[in-house]
C-alpha cells in the first residue's frame, strides 16, 4: 500500500487496526481508554529523534467515531512517526482551550453543535499545522459567501441572484413574482429555478416548475429514511427569509459529489439527484448508493481551485454536469467518502505524506515520499461470439391522446383588441396565448360578454353566442389550466375575415377584426401515461446483464447499468405537451422512478424543437406534398367503384394494407355518404342522451361532458360535407381519431353503429394518412426528407459518437468494487415525436435503398411485414441497436454490428385477428440457439456480461413474436405465467412487469397466459390496450453499411432542400420586383 511503510505494515495481519506508538517500540490495539485520549502529552525530556508527530482530531464525537474517520485514522497510524489524538467531546464543549490536548497537526471541522470559535482560539494559542483552515469555515456556512468566493476564483456556477431580506439593505430585497418567473433585484429567472436558503445549514432547497410542465415545486431536505425530497403543488416562492435564486441546471437526474484530499487528489461519485423523485436508493446496509465516476481534466482543475480557494485540504463539493459544462453548486467543507476502501487508502496516504512533508524536517525525522507506478485502467474483454451492446436509439410516437379539436371565431369586441395589444400582438400580427394567466383573461372576457348578452339581448356584441359559450366551456374544462392542453391564437385581419367554411357567417362586415382560434384536446390520457410507463419498463429488457440486487429480475441489466452510472442516457421530445409527458412517463418506467411526472419531465426530458429535429414545421412542407394531397382528393371524390387504374394510381407500391382498405371501401363517395350518415345518427343519439335528465350530467372519460362530445361530432358533421356537396377528405383522420377514442374510452354509452363507423373511417384513414406522406416511392422519400432530415443526421451522429471518448459519466475502474465490467458504457438516445416523423423515418428505411430486397431475404420479409401494417398507432417504435465485437480488428466491418427493430405500437380495436405476422425480436442464430437456457429461467441474467448477438447470417424463425405485456388492473400488477419445458412457472410481481425479451422470443405466443383483469382503481387503466412487441427487421447490418446509407440520404436530402429554398427565394424576388414595377407605373 505505502512503499515507505512496508516494514511497519508487514507486522499487522488482516484488516488494518488503529495503533498507537509506545516507548518500547511495540504496538497494541486501541481500547476504549485510548479512544478517549490516544496519545499522552509528550515530555520535555523526550529525545527529539523519538518524537511522534501528534495529529489531533477536534470535532464532535459523532464525526470522530464515524466509520470513514475510523477507517482513515487506522491507516494514518500505520505511518511510523504519526500518532493520533482524538479530543473528547466533553473537553471540547466544557473545558477552556488551554486545557485541550496538545498536538502538532490539527484536523478540526464544524458540524452541528461544534464550538468553532473555541477551535479558532486553540489554533491561535498552539499554532499547529492546520489541515483545514478554521476561519474559512465561517464562510462555508453562508451560501452567499461560498458563491462570492467561487465567482472570484473564476469557477463556473449557475447564474444566480441573492435576495437579502435585511431592513438595513432594502436595495437587495426587490422581488417581483410572476406566474412562470421571478425577478430578483432586476435579474429574471424563468421556471424551472432553484431557491436556496442563504444558510448552508438549512437544507430546505426548493425547485419551482413551469406551468407548461405541470407547475408545483420539489422540496428537498436532509435525508429522512428513504426520502430526500417531496413534490408539492405549491408554485409560489417563500415570502420570509433570505434566499439565493439560481438557474436550474438540467443534469439528466444525476448529481456528482467531489471529495478532495489536497489540491492534487479528487475522488468523484455520482448519485441519483434528490430532486428527481425524492427516493433515496440504498444498499443492503442502508447506505445511499453512489458510484465513483471519472473527472475530466477541467473538472480536476475545478477541484484544485475549490480546495485552494477555501483552504480546505479535505473538502467536499457538488458538481452539476449540464449542457457539456460542469458547474459548482455547493461547497460542503470537510467531507469523507462513505464506502470506498480504495479512497480510505488514498486519503490516509495523502494526509500522512502531507503531515510528514511539513513536520518531519523540524523534528529531524528521516522521510521521503515514495514513488508509485501509475494506475492502469481495467479494460473488459469479450470472447467468442459475445458482443457488447454499445448504443440504443429509439424513435417513439406519443401515447394515447384525446381527439385534437379546433374552433374558429371572428371577434371584434374592444376587450379582445385590448388583450391583443397587451401581449404585443401588433408586432407581427399574431399572438399565441398558452399561459394560465393569459387563458384566464380570455375566459373572463367570454364570461363578461355572455353575461351582457343575458342581461341585454339587444346589446351591440357581434360575437356569436354559441361560439362564446363553446369558448367558455372549453376553457372551464378540468377546473384548472395546465398550460399544455389548451391554447388560443389571435390573428389581426385589417379587413375582416373572408368566409372560408360552413362555420362562417354569410354576411361579411367591414373594418378590422381578430380571428380567434381555440385549440384544445390532443393531450395525453391516463391510458397514454400507463402505456408509456409500461413500455419504458419493457424497454429495460433489451439491455444485457445484471447482478447483485438486480439478479433474477427482468430488465435488470438496464437498471444495473444506469444505477452504476455506465449508462449515457438522453431523452428528447418535441414541444407538444402530449409528447413531453409521454417521454416523462416512459423515463419513469425505464428507470424505475417514483412520484409525479413533472420533476422527471423537467430534469430528464430535453425539448428538441430546434432545427425541426422532432417538430413539424409547416413552412418546410414541400410542393410535392401539396400535389399528393390534391391527387388524393381527386381520386377519393369519384362516385364510381375503384378501377384497376385507381389501384395503380393510389397504391403503386402494391402495399397489401392499402389494397385491403380499397377493397373495403369499393366506392369512395358512397362510403363517405355512409360515414356522414353514421355521424348524423351519432349526433342525434347524443342529443337524445342530453335531453334525458338521467344522463345529462354524465361524466365521460377524462372529464369530458356529453355536451363537449356533441360539439366535436357536430363540428365534424358540418365540416366533412361541404356546401357544394363534396367531401373534405382532410377531415377523415379527425373522424377516425374521434371514433377510435370513443370506441375505446366511451363504449359504456352503447351508441349504435359506432363499430361500423369505426370500420369504414379506419379503411378511409388507412389510405389517406400514409399516402399523405407520398404515393410513389420518390414522393415518399421527398416528403420524408423534408420532415425528418435533421433527425436522420442526429441518428447518424449518435452512431458515430458511440465509440468516441466523450465527457460523460464514466465509472472509475479502480474504485468500482462489485462491478464486473466497469469499462462498459452504453449510450441510449430516445426521441419522442408525433406521427409525421415516425411515418417519414420508416419511409426512409423502406424506400431509401438501405438494402436490396431482391438480394436479401431477411429484408424482403421485413418489407412484406411493414407493407401489411395498417397503422402506426400510439407508441410506435423504431429502434436501432449497435453492438461491438472487441475481438475483431477496429478497422474491420465486422467490428460493429447494427440491428433494426420495429413495433406498430398500441393494438387497435378488433386487431387481434388481423395482426400481421412478424418474425420475433432478435431471431437467434443456430450457434446461439444451442446455448439458450430454459425459457422459464432467468439464470442468464446473473452475470454482468455483454449480450449475445449473432455474427453468422440470420436464421429467421417462422412464427409471430409473443405479446410482451402483463395486464395492469388499476394500480395492481397481475402475475403472468410462462410455460417452458418444465411446465408453468409464475414470474413474481417485479416492478418492471415485463419478462426478458430474449426469454420470451423462445416461447410460442399460444403458450402465454395472463391473469384476469380486475376492476380499475385508476382512471383508464382497465382500458389500456396492449402494445405490439418489437419485431426485428434486420439483425446483420454493419455500421459502415448504415453510415454510408445515412450519408447518401443526408446529402441527397440537403441538395433537394437547397433547390427548394432557391426556388422559393427566386419566386419571392420575382414577386417583389413585380410589385415595385407596378408601383412605379
Image (cartoon, rainbow, N blue to C red):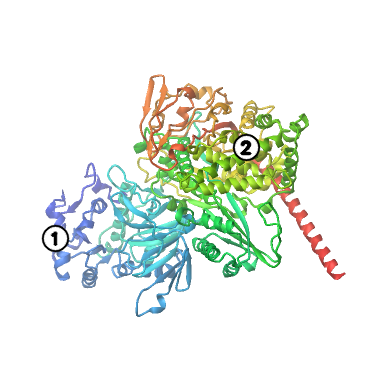
Considering every residue shown, the one lying at the far bottom of the view is 168
The residue under the point 61% across, 48% down is: 715
Q: Secondary structure at mark 1?
A: loop
Q: Secondary structure at mark 2?
A: helix
Q: Is residue 874 visible?
A: no
Q: Earlier in the sequence, mark 1 or mark 2?
A: 1
> Spatial distance from mark 1 to mark 2, Cα to Cα?
93 Å
Q: Position of residue 130 (x, y in %)?
A: 28, 65
Q: Position of residue 630 (x, y in %)?
A: 74, 44
- Quadrant location of the C terminus in the rendered image: bottom right
Up/down of 571 relative to 436, above or below: above
Residue 451 relative to residue 261: left or right: right
Residue 628 relative to residue 291: left or right: right
Q: Position of residue 896 (x, y in %)?
A: 56, 36
Q: Is residue 683 visible?
A: yes
Closest to the observer: 649 or 41? 649
Up/down of 204 relative to 673, above or below: below
Residue labelled with disc 1: 40
Considering every residue shown, the one lying at the far right of the view is 1081
Up/down of 1015 relative to 986, above or below: below
Q: Which mark is residue 761?
A: 2
> Local crowd at mark 2 within 10 Å, few (<14), some, or many (≥20)?
many
Q: Position of residue 1005 (x, y in %)?
A: 49, 24
> Local crowd at mark 1 within 10 Å, few (<14), some, or many (≥20)?
few
Please tell me whether mark 1 or mark 2 is closer to you in this view.
2
Closest to the observer: 566 or 351? 566
Up/down of 549 relative to 868, above or below: below
Query: Image quarter for residue 468?
Result: bottom right
Amino acid at each position: 500500500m505505502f512503499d515507505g511503510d512496508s516494514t511497519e505494515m508487514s507486522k499487522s495481519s488482516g484488516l488494518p487496526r488503529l495503533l498507537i506508538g509506545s516507548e518500547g517500540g511495540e504496538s497494541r490495539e486501541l481500547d476504549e481508554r485510548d479512544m478517549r485520549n490516544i496519545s499522552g502529552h509528550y515530555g520535555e525530556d523526550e529525545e527529539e529523534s523519538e518524537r511522534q508527530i501528534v495529529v489531533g482530531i477536534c470535532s464532535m464525537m459523532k464525526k470522530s467515531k464515524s466509520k470513514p474517520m475510523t477507517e482513515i485514522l487506522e491507516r494514518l497510524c500505520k505511518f511510523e512517526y504519526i500518532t493520533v489524538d482524538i479530543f473528547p467531546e466533553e473537553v471540547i464543549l466544557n473545558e477552556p482551550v488551554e486545557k485541550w490536548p496538545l498536538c502538532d497537526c490539527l484536523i478540526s471541522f464544524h458540524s452541528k453543535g461544534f464550538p468553532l470559535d473555541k477551535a479558532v482560539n486553540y489554533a491561535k494559542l498552539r499554532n499547529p499545522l492546520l489541515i483545514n483552515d478554521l476561519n474559512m469555515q465561517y464562510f462555508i456556512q453562508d451560501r452567499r459567501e461560498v458563491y462570492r468566493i467561487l465567482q472570484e476564483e473564476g469557477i463556473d456556477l449557475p447564474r444566480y441572484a441573492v435576495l437579502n431580506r435585511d431592513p438595513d439593505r432594502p436595495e437587495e430585497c426587490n422581488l417581483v413574482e410572476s406566474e412562470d418567473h421571478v425577478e430578483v433585484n432586476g435579474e429574471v429567472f424563468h421556471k424551472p429555478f432553484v431557491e436556496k436558503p442563504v444558510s448552508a445549514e438549512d437544507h430546505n432547497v426548493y425547485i419551482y416548475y413551469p406551468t407548461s410542465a405541470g407547475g408545483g415545486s420539489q422540496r428537498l431536505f436532509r435525508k429522512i429514511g428513504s426520502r430526500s425530497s417531496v413534490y408539492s403543488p405549491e408554485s409560489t416562492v417563500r415570502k420570509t427569509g433570505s434566499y439565493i435564486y439560481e438557474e436550474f441546471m438540467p443534469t439528466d437526474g444525476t448529481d456528482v459529489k467531489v471529495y478532495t484530499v489536497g489540491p492534487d487528489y479528487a475522488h468523484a461519485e455520482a448519485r441519483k439527484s434528490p430532486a428527481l423523485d425524492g427516493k433515496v436508493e440504498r444498499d443492503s446496509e442502508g447506505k445511499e448508493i453512489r458510484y465513483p465516476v471519472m473527472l475530466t481534466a477541467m473538472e480536476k482543475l475545478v477541484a484544485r481551485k475549490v480546495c485552494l480557494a477555501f483552504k480546505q485540504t479535505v473538502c467536499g463539493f457538488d458538481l452539476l454536469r449540464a449542457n457539456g459544462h460542469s458547474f459548482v453548486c455547493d461547497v460542503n467543507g470537510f467531507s469523507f467518502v462513505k464506502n470506498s476502501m480504495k479512497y480510505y487508502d488514498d486519503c490516509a496516504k495523502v494526509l500522512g505524506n502531507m503531515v510528514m512533508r511539513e513536520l518531519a524536517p523540524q523534528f529531524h525525522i528521516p522521510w521521503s515520499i515514495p514513488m508509485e507506478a501509475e494506475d492502469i485502467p481495467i479494460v473488459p474483454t469479450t470472447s467468442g461470439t459475445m458482443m457488447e451492446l454499445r448504443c440504443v436509439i429509439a424513435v417513439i410516437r406519443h401515447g394515447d391522446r384525446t381527439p385534437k379539436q379546433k374552433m374558429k371565431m371572428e371577434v371584434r369586441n374592444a376587450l379582445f383588441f385590448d388583450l391583443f395589444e397587451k401581449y404585443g400582438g401588433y408586432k407581427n400580427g399574431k399572438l399565441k396565448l398558452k399561459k394560465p394567466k393569459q387563458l384566464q383573461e380570455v375566459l373572463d372576457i367570454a364570461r363578461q360578454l355572455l353575461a351582457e348578452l343575458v342581461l341585454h339581448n339587444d346589446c351591440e356584441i357581434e360575437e356569436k353566442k354559441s361560439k362564446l359559450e363553446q369558448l367558455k366551456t372549453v376553457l372551464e374544462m378540468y377546473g384548472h389550466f395546465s398550460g399544455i392542453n389548451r391554447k388560443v391564437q389571435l390573428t389581426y385581419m385589417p379587413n375582416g375575415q373572408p368566409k372560408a367554411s360552413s362555420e362562417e357567417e354569410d354576411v361579411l362586415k367591414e373594418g378590422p377584426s381578430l380571428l380567434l382560434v381555440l385549440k384544445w384536446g390532443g393531450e395525453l390520457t391516463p391510458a397514454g401515461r400507463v402505456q408509456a410507463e409500461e413500455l419504458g419498463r419493457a424497454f429495460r429488457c433489451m439491455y444485457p446483464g445484471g447482478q447483485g440486487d438486480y439478479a433474477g429480475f427482468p430488465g435488470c441489466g438496464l437498471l444495473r447499468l444506469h444505477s452504476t452510472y455506465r449508462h449515457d442516457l438522453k431523452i428528447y421530445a418535441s414541444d407538444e405537451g402530449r409528447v413531453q409527458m409521454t417521454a416523462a412517463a416512459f423515463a419513469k418506467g425505464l428507470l424505475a422512478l417514483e412520484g409525479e411526472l413533472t420533476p422527471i419531465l423537467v430534469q430528464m426530458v430535453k425539448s428538441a424543437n430546434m432545427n425541426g429535429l422532432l417538430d413539424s414545421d409547416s413552412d418546410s412542407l414541400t410542393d410535392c406534398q401539396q400535389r399528393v394531397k390534391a391527387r388524393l382528393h381527386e381520386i377519393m371524390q369519384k362516385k364510381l367503384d375503384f378501377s384497376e387504374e385507381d389501384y395503380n394510381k393510389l397504391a403503386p407500391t402494391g402495399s397489401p394494407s392499402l389494397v385491403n382498405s380499397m377493397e373495403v371501401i369499393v366506392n369512395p363517395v358512397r362510403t363517405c355518404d355512409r360515414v356522414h350518415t353514421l355521424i348524423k345518427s351519432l349526433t342525434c343519439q347524443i342529443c337524445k342522451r342530453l335531453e334525458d335528465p338521467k344522463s345529462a350530467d354524465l361524466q365521460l372519460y377524462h372529464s369530458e361532458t356529453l355536451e363537449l362530445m356533441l360539439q366535436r361530432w357536430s363540428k365534424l358533421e358540418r365540416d366533412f360535407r361541404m356546401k357544394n356537396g363534396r367531401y373534405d377528405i382532410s377531415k377523415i383522420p379527425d373522424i377516425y381519431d374521434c371514433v377510435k377514442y370513443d370506441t375505446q374510452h366511451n363504449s359504456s354509452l352503447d351508441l349504435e353503429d359506432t363499430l361500423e363507423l369505426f370500420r369504414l373511417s379506419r379503411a378511409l384513414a388507412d389510405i389517406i394518412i400514409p399516402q399523405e406522406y407520398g404515393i410513389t416511392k420518390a414522393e415518399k422519400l421527398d416528403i420524408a426528407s423534408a420532415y425528418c432530415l435533421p433527425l436522420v443526421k442526429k441518428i447518424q451522429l449518435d452512431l458515430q459518437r458511440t465509440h468516441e471518448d466523450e465527457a460523460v459519466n464514466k465509472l472509475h475502474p479502480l474504485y468500482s468494487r462489485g462491478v464486473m465490467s466497469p469499462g462498459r458504457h452504453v449510450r441510449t438516445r430516445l426521441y419522442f415525436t408525433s406521427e409525421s416523423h415516425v411515418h417519414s423515418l420508416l419511409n426512409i428505411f423502406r424506400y431509401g435503398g438501405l438494402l436490396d430486397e431482391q438480394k436479401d431475404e431477411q429484408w424482403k420479409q421485413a418489407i412484406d411485414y411493414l407493407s401489411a401494417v395498417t397503422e402506426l398507432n400510439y407508441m410506435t417504435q423504431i429502434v436501432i441497436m449497435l453492438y461491438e465485437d472487441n475481438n475483431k480488428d477496429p478497422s474491420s466491418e465486422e467490428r460493429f454490428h447494427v440491428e433494426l427493430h420495429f413495433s406498430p405500437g398500441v393494438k387497435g380495436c378488433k386487431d387481434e385477428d388481423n395482426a400481421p405476422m412478424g418474425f420475433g425480436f432478435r431471431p437467434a442464430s443456430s450457434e446461439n440457439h444451442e446455448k439458450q437456457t430454459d425459457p422459464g429461467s432467468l439464470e442468464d441474467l446473473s452475470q454482468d456480461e455483454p449480450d449475445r448477438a449473432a455474427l453468422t447470417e440470420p436464421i429467421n424463425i417462422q412464427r409471430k413474436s409473443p405479446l410482451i405485456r402483463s395486464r395492469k388492473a388499476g394500480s395492481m400488477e397481475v402475475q403472468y405465467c410462462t410455460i417452458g419445458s418444465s411446465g408453468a412457472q409464475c414470474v413474481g410481481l417485479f416492478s418492471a412487469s415485463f419478462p426478458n425479451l430474449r426469454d420470451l422470443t423462445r416461447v410460442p405466443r399460444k403458450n402465454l397466459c395472463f391473469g384476469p383483469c380486475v376492476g380499475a382503481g385508476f382512471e383508464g387503466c382497465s382500458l389500456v390496450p396492449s402494445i405490439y412487441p418489437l419485431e426485428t427487421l434486420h439483425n446483420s447490418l454493419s455500421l459502415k453499411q448504415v453510415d454510408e446509407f445515412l450519408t447518401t440520404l443526408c446529402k441527397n436530402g440537403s441538395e433537394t432542400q437547397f433547390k427548394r429554398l432557391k426556388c422559393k427565394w427566386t419566386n419571392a424576388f420575382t414577386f417583389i420586383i413585380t410589385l415595385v414595377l407596378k408601383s412605379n407605373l
